[in-house]
Image (tube, rainbow, N blue to C red):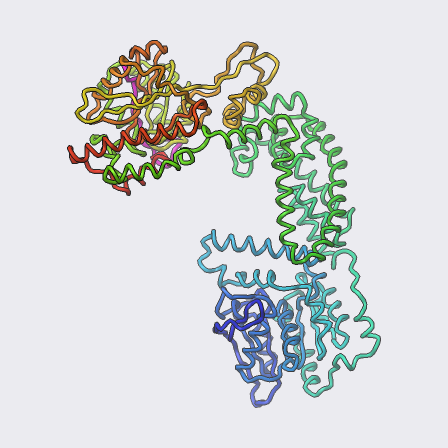
Amino acid sequence: MQLIDEDGEPTGQVTTVYYRDLRPPGKPDAPVIVLLHGSLATDHDRDALAQALAADFRVIVPDLPGFGSSDGPDLPDYSPPAYAGELDDFLTGLHLERVHVAAFGMGGAIALELADSVPERVQSLILLDSVGTAEFQWLGDPVLNHALYGAQLGAFNAARVLLPHFGLLDTGPLNFAVVRIYWDTDHDRIRDLLGAYHNPMLIVHAQDDFFVPLASAKESYRIVPQSQLVVVPGGHWTPLRHPELVVPAIREFVERAEHGQERTKSDVEPARVLAASKPVTITGPSSRTYEAMLLFIIAVLSLFGEDATCIGAGLLIARGVLGFWVVMAALLAAIFAGNLMYYIVGWRFGAPALKHPLFRWAIKESDLQRMTVLYHQRGTWIVFVSRFVPASRLPVFMSAGILRFSFWRMFVALVISNLLFTPLFVWTASLFGQQMFAMIEHYEKAALFVAVICVVVVLAVMHIVQPLCTWRGRQLWRSRWRRMTRWEFWSAWQVQAPILPALWRLARRSGGMRVFTCANPAFPMGGSVGVPKSVFLWALNGAGGALPRWTLLTAATADSAKKAESRAEALDAWMAKEDINWPLVLKRDVGGQGLGVRICRQHKEAARFFVDNLGPVVAQEYVPGLEFSIWYAREPKAPVGRILAMAEAQFPTVMGDGKHSLDRLILSDDRALCSGRIFLAKYAARLADTPAAGEVVVLSELAQPSDGAYALDATAEFSTPELTAAVDTLARRMPDFHFGRFTVRCPSREDLRAGKNLHVLGAAGVKAAASIIRDPRRSLAEVRQQAVQRWEACFAIGAVMRTRRRAQPAVWKDIIKGIFRARTGG
């Protein structure tokens, strides 16, 4: 069979078609019936009907491309016109010039297309529970149905790509061809094809067909005045499973058509022709079963998105598929039931319910404390307003149940808000829905583009316009804008990408891109990304009191709960042995950019940290004081090293006034606002608290941008000969350490200048060349120039060490593995 493309032209491709040719014994010239399958076709679904018909007729039973045993599923076009062209080519190959076509289900659309394109080949049509006009399919409207088929195709494609289906979605009964044929079919065209058909037609339909209601068959019978309608008991599959109910009518019809005794369109009485010419009038769904099914779908969907469901229900009302009051009754009942269900779940199971995957995305346990205050102050108002705020339903009613908010206050607010809002919302959707459908029908070619624009506008209103209507929303958008426009909040790649050409020139002069990893020969990859922190801490053990006490806790297996507790107990034992008290600093042994670092103040916090971090963990004594980062370089054989740069960590704070909440203080502070989302998430449980007047709240404890901290360039102010000598002494205690960065704390700036009372929290190797000082006082050009200078020192030292000490650069494989380990925690 030759394949046809979407323009109706042969593609030049040929596919293999499986078919059966059943012939009656002793009747070589028997009439030929081509028996077409529906969309849910299987290899043998037509066997019983074909065998029964084969007693009197020659029966051709093809599996069209993509269905049954025929090749598929990747075809250029799955539309009925394409299949009709391929079927015509198939019949030509069998030398069949004139046939009777019996079509089941979706096959009816293909049969009508065949009769329209090559009417001389189709002697008669037999429609067996065949698909009919668009008004009687599913949602009762061509536009809505096409949207439904598009959603079905999208979901199927996603499942086909994302799920391990082992070919079942390509070859099983429910396969790609099934969903694609509905999407590719122009269902509006079926009415025109029925009206244009001229030859005899027999319509056989089951009384209780759920998929294609009997009303659809009656409409086809009305449109084709020469047709006959035979109604049989049973459901959609009756013609295939109970051939004894349909074969007598088919046999009589075909024999009469063979002898020219069946009517064509030109033989019909005027009354039937007049009835066929009248426009269709449809009020409500085609059957009570459909109405019940649509109302059930609306009720279920309202549990997941009540506003979207209201819009969809309004569109169904706009097209006359459902009545307004019937929809309202179903919607209100479903919304009440859904909200009460969330309330009861929260009441019955309490806070532990939030750990379930169905609910933990909506409410965080840390939010409950803040919600307690809000419900105590304005609980009834929160429930009332939630009906007007998208996506607030689950968190509001779930938390109301968990916090034991008054049932009757909640119920009254729920009833009033829904009676006010839901009918108005649905009525508005139906009103605008009529105009929208009129525009879609008028501008059919641009409908998809308009739909996309509408979706974009709706999302913009929800995520931009709506937040801008409140002070808090405006402040959060101001925070976003600052983070987008100020370089200090950009990623390291964004900042340093323009210096890549300079690094390339450095690499060419130095002998290769990996030469910098030779700068510290005694450390893996020179201390590049992914090298454990403990490697440098072991090397610093000779620093005496300058290094806070620390220990390394080995990795845990996947069963983290028990292992976490055992590691927490091991931590307690080490603290007791070393006589160390809380707080304590815990950090991943492999990591960077502040990921996996926490200051823990009690055993419970440490145990939770171990659950979240299964890899090796460094536990270190907490040292208060000012924190600085010091970049250091010492050329080989140089008598003393030098300080390349220094940065002083800044930890944002806000001061209470006794009037405003912590949430308001954070969003009002000019600096804290820049990292507003970080702080709001970090202090979610305390946002409703009102700090006392003069109380200072430290928002960040870690000297990392990921925790909201920033840095000031302190090179000129603190780079003294005394500090240089102290840092050089530390570096020389580490074997073959020539380039890197030290993180230190000290009691005061005077001590730092004098190089006294330094406590080394950690060190880094050549990866320090890629770190930057995020000083808002510096321009981006200055920062990039400093970065190039550090890279120049690193490459120069690496080149010398490679030449004199024959140090070997790290291989790319190890460098890439190191980057991966740093991001995953080892």
Tell me the residue at 74%/81% (across/down). Answer: 264
Query: Which of the 4 image quadrants contains residue 566?
Result: top left
Q: Is residue 56 visible?
A: no
Q: Nearer the viewer, residue 20 or 431?
A: 431
Compared with 318, 227 (above or below) is: below
- The residue furthest right is 271
Quadrant in which the C terminus is drawn: top left
Q: Range of the magenta residues?
A: 546-562
Q: How many marks?
A: 0
Picture layout, residue 425 above or below residue 2? above
- Residue at 76% across / 40% down in the picture? 424
* Residue 632 location, quadrant: top left
> Residue 8: image x %, image y %?
58, 71
Q: Nearer the viewer, residue 264 or 772?
A: 772
Q: Position of residue 49 (x, y in %)?
A: 60, 75
| The quarter of the displayed image where residue 346 is located | top right
Nearest the eye: 220 or 494: 494
| Observer able to see residue 558 | yes
Residue at image point 25% right, 35% down = 517
Q: Is residue 650 above or below residue 270?
A: above
State left or right for residue 378 relative to residue 269: left
Q: Position of residue 373 (x, y in %)?
A: 62, 21
Task: Using the image as rendered, state which of residue 114 and residue 329 is in the foreground.
Answer: 114
Residue 632 is a magenta residue: no
